[in-house]
Image (cartoon, grey):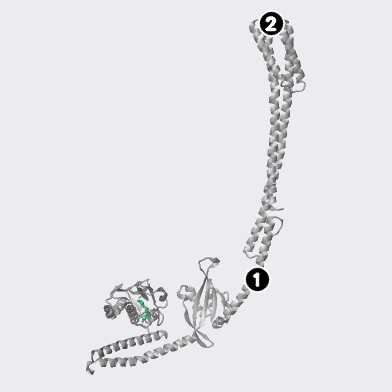
Amino acid sequence: MKLKTKLYLSFGFLFLLILLLAGLGSLFVRQLADDSQAIIKDNYRTLDYMQSIKTALDKTILTIGKQDSKSKAEQGFAFESILESIEKQKANITEPGEDKLTDELIKQVELLKISLNENIPSEFLLMQIATIQDLATKIYELNIQTLLRKNDTANQTAERVVLYMAITGISGSILSLIFIIGFPEVIFDPLQKLNEGIKAIASKKYDHQLKVAENDELGEIASSFNLMASRLKEYEASNFSLLFSEKKRIEAIINQMHEGIIGIDENHKILFINDFAKNVLNLSEEYIKGEHIQSIAKINDIIASFATDFALGGQESLTPKTIKIVLDKEEKTFSREIIPINISKDNHDKLENVGYVVVLTDITQYSERDKAKTQFIATISHELKTPISSIGLGLKLLNDKRTGSLNESQSNLIKGLIEDKNRLLSITGELLDITQAETGNITLEQEVFSPQEVITLASEALQLQLKEKKINLELTIQPELHALGDENKTTWVLVNLLSNAIRYSSEESTIKMTCSQHYENHILFEVIDQGKGISKSFQDRLFEKYYRVPGTKTNGSGLGLNISKEFIQAMGGQIGVESEDGKGSRFWFSLKSK
Ligand code: ADP
């Protein structure tokens, strides 16, 4: 049976029950009312008439034997009342035998009327009145009897009504109770089972099936649910095999790669490692899979090197680093990059970290070529120094008046040649510095020096350039600071930053140089200009070797900032820039303080 039909039937049944109770109630009440009405209406009237006849007869008795007009009038009134009551009684005969008694009453009253008008002795009249009174009493009693009987009937009806109503009420209540208790079960049970089924599906238990007990709508829902569960099962099976084959394919690709790949989850546990990485790290997958990198770090130096970075966190740890690994008794150079994997779970916009991929790339070839190039540049720069010095000496001699006088254009030519020689000398000097930095051959002093002196030295060295461009240099130096590092190299860096600021600033602008305590144990140096600024997209590459912002017209090698970075980092400090296109730049570096 359909659920809809069940609902119709159940509520229809309740409706009928209510109708039955209402119908029976009004029927019984009607019956009771009819019975009571019968009592009040007919019999009560007869009692009333008989009572008035009796009263009128009593009054008539009092006038018998009296001949005065008042008595005669009273007798007339009394008789009138008797006649009136008799008329009414004639129309109100209800009980069997009442008609005969009424007829007899009328006959006796008529006889009394005649007797009253004739001169009949009082005794005879009183006898006649007594007969009428007797008849009236009989009619009265007949009606009283009927009243009592009807009252009994009404009482019986009332008792019957109470009984019937009680039976109907109790049976109706029992049926409603059964219905109220039983009906929600009919709906609730299947819904609860459906709910359990949905929860099972949500937790991927696709084997879950619902029992199809009824052929109604809930039964249809159960069948649809079962169909959905079996389809999901099929889908999962096909999806699983697809995913499995895709996983195999990706694993094969990762294993074929000539780079070491290590997958790490968000809790820093190793997820996978490809063949190349296994070989490089000399580890087997079974041994390290699922292990925390900190525990592998204890037995493997390479993992230990990036486990520290993981422990530290932060952007710095993610920047690629170069590491040396001995493979097959040969020292190899690898670049090691940690790439965080951020995805948006549940299609939310917010990205969440789900782990990292560590990529180990063998860069031995490139680093050897780089080393050869650096060596070459170092040799050339060194070799060039001697001829450049000879050129310088030659130009000095030429410029000397003692070796002969020069005309103006010759002397201008010599001036230009001296400037070019100086540029060549500074470029070869910078190239030598950079090769030293790259090969790790920088010799650094670790001394305590006064930042104030270094800043004064740097600003004095560039007085000429400042004057040429009419630039105002503002110095703000916190007194009594003591920096720890190489004084000469720090001066070199400051000169380089200040000379950049001068070169890339317009005339008559202001450059600020500051030096202050930074946190508890660092000193911060800043060079702030109002020049052309550097757009954000170029700032990342600014400290790279030979890098110059595209479109830079001023002469330069693109080495100054790179050398500065090498020097500052070698001293254990940090260097950086903040700038906006057209809004000036702020170059800063920090060193440890004493
Ligand atoms: P260069 O010899 O070219 O100045 P640097 O390494 O000192 O080499 O600087 C690299 C590049 O950075 C420069 O070519 C220039 O484009 C940019 N740059 C450096 N300092 C500033 C500055 N204060 N304002 C604007 N651009 C600058």
The mark found on residue 65 in the picture is 2
Is 551 placed left or right of 270 in the picture? left
Q: Closer to the camera, 591 or 448?
A: 591
Quarter containing ligand 1?
Answer: bottom left
- Point 70% across, 17% down: residue: 87
- N-terminal-most mark, 1 or 2: 2
Q: Quadrant of residue 557?
A: bottom left
Decide: marks 1, 2 in contact (CB < 8 A)? no
Residue 229: x percent and y percent?
A: 66, 64
Asked if residue 208 shows in the view, the reply is no
Image quadrant assignment for residue 449: bottom left
Amino acid type assigned to the residue bearing label 1 in the image: Ser
Q: Hey, which residue is sitting farthest bottom in the picture?
A: 403
> Quick check: 424 above or below 76?
below
Please state which amino acid type lies under the numbered disc 2: Gly
Residue that appears at 65% across and 68% down: 235
User: Height in image: 271 above or below 149?
Assistant: below
For the residue pair 255 and 571, the one nearer the viewer reads as 255
Q: To which residue does mark 1 refer?
A: 238
- Horizontally, is 453 left or right of 360 in the view? left
Q: CA distance from mark 1 to mark 2?
A: 131 Å
Some atom of ligand 1 lies within 8 Å of the CB belonging to the residue at label 1:
no
